[in-house]
Image: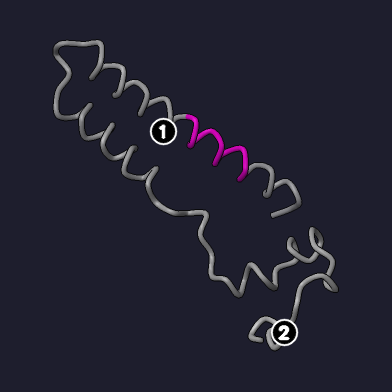
Amino acid sequence: MGAMAGPAVRWAGALVALGLGAVWWWAVLRLVLSGDAGVLEGAVAAGGWGLSLLPVHCVPKDSVSKGPVLKTLVAEDSVPDDEARDH
């Protein structure tokens, strides 16, 4: 696979996420606006809401403090080492 596999995978992921978001909104709107919404719509809406509660942004503290992003955002001299933090 060449260099085009990366962008293709990203586009496919974005399209899948967009499709799942559209299905979730369809279910929520049917529950709110329609009198004949059923178990399927309720399950889709509850499942999507439950997924939104997952803390996917959480990472272990060590990987954040030593990651390349933090080093580019904060100068290394301004971050105290482990011994200086303990005292």
Mark 1: secondary structure: helix
Residue at the location (36% across, 45% down)? 51
Disc ID at residue 65: none
Vertical arrangement, residue 55 with respect to residue 62, above or below? above
Residue at the outermost front position: 87
Question: Does the magenta-highlighted stretch encompass residue 11?
Answer: yes
Vertical arrangement, residue 14 with respect to residue 86, above or below? above
Residue at the location (79% across, 66% down)? 71
Measured as percent of width and height from the top left, residue 56 is found at: 47, 54
Q: Earlier in the sequence, mark 1 or mark 2?
A: 1
Find the magenta span and give its range: 9-18
Give the amino acid type for the residue marked by disc 1 in the picture.
Answer: Leu
In space, the residues marked 1 and 2 are separated at their CA atoms by: 48 Å
Mark 2: secondary structure: helix
In the picture, which quadrant includes the N terminus? bottom right
Question: Does the magenta-highlighted stretch encompass residue 78?
Answer: no
- Number of residue marks: 2
Disc ID at residue 84: 2
Q: Which residue is mark 1?
A: 20
Give the amino acid type for the residue marked by disc 2 in the picture.
Answer: Ala
Residue 69 sits in quarter: bottom right
